[in-house]
Image (spheres, rainbow, N blue to C red):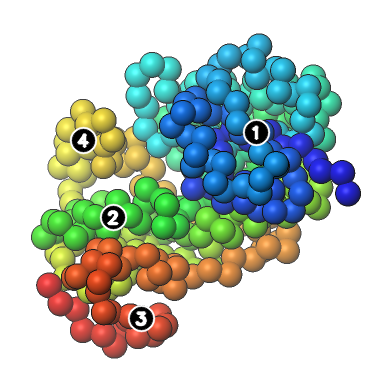
Amino acid sequence: MKAKNCLIFGGSGQIGRNLIRKLTKNNYKVTVVTRNIHQKSYIIKTQANAGYIDIVESSIFEENKIRELFQRTDICINLIGILFEQRKGNTFKNIHTIFPAILAKLSKEYNLKHFIHLSALGINDAIDSDYARSKLEGEKEILKNFPLATILRPSLVFSQDDQLTTNFLTILNRLPLFPLYYNGRTKFAPIHCSDLTDTIYHVISNNIYSKIIECVGPEIISFKELLQRLLELINKKRILVPCPLPIAELSARFFEILPKPIITRDQLRLLKYDNIASGKYKTNSDIGMPSKRYFNDEVKKYCYMWREGGQFSTEKYTSSNDLENKPSQN
């Protein structure tokens, strides 16, 4: 079988690295575009089978340079996204709306076989969020320019390389209390990175077109329950304090000053809305790729660094049921 050529934007993140391993293992040739080849090339190249990967340094808005890459590719995959805005062009509109539109136009111009775009779950409801609006506008631009595109909308994506569970574990390990926004009622369907990349590969290898697919994990967890599970996994007790909205907004305004804010006002608005399957679109289960990895079972594989004793911790959990019967310690 002749190897298909995949062009990936956002290949150095947790999802991109996982997908590169999957694609090159199955004889797909991959070209990854990165802004900093000296910083990212080692991270990316070590994920791939030798001879199946090329790395190109380019800004995402160097259209002439990117255009050359489209001349020798079959499938374009866009995994780029940001959780908060920064200076120097890293705005929601640029990253989530304008850039995907450029990729979709180039995919059409060069008659690519497929265009796959990673969006986000729950963006239809969160109309007061700049993040959600930019994602939704990006989807509209993509489908206008490349109607055969497949758009994937994942819930929270977690793995040992994420910035979700690892950040929460670090904060919970260091602070005596943690704020519960909206009383911790917001619901999520966390999907493991490997389940998500298995779904992306399934879409590619089975030529699934013209779909919006909601990618969810096998269980629904509230924000409060998610924090409680993390605390149980690292054997800690912390106070989870309901945080009044005015105080939450004030603290978010302060955090926005930081280079990597813990939470922003826009993310606070997102937390008003559940992040679970809407029932309006097909899910990964509907296309034959149900998620197999459960939150506790996966997080316990890497959370030992936040337990007492760190990597030398003797605490071993054999199943999720063990957590329910295990006493917590400070």
Number of disc labels: 4
Q: Are marks 4 and 3 in contact (CB under 8 Å)?
A: no
Label 2 element class? helix
- Which of 2 and 222 lies nearest the eye of the viewer? 2
Q: Which of the two labelled residues, at mark 1 and mark 3, occupies the earlier sequence position? A: 1
Q: Which of the two labelled residues, at mark 1 and mark 4, occupies the earlier sequence position? A: 1
Which of pointers 1 and 4 indicates the residue nearer the eye? 1
- Marker disc for residue 317: 3
Q: Are marks 2 and 3 in contact (CB under 8 Å)?
A: no
- Marker disc for residue 168: 2
Which of pointers 1 and 3 indicates the residue nearer the eye? 1
Quadrant position of residue 292: bottom right
Which of pointers 2 and 1 indicates the residue nearer the eye? 1
Q: Which residue is mark 4?
A: 255
The disc labelled 3 sits on which kind of residue? Tyr
Task: Specify few, some or many for label 3: CA neighbours under 10 Å numbering under 14, 14-19, or 20 or more.
Answer: some
The disc labelled 4 sits on which kind of residue? Phe
- Marker disc for residue 54: 1
Task: Specify few, some or many for label 2: CA neighbours under 10 Å numbering under 14, 14-19, or 20 or more.
Answer: some
Task: Specify few, some or many for label 4: CA neighbours under 10 Å numbering under 14, 14-19, or 20 or more.
Answer: some
Q: Which of the two labelled residues, at mark 2 and mark 1, occupies the earlier sequence position? A: 1
C-alpha distance separating marks 2 and 3: 20 Å
Q: Which of the two labelled residues, at mark 2 and mark 3, occupies the earlier sequence position? A: 2
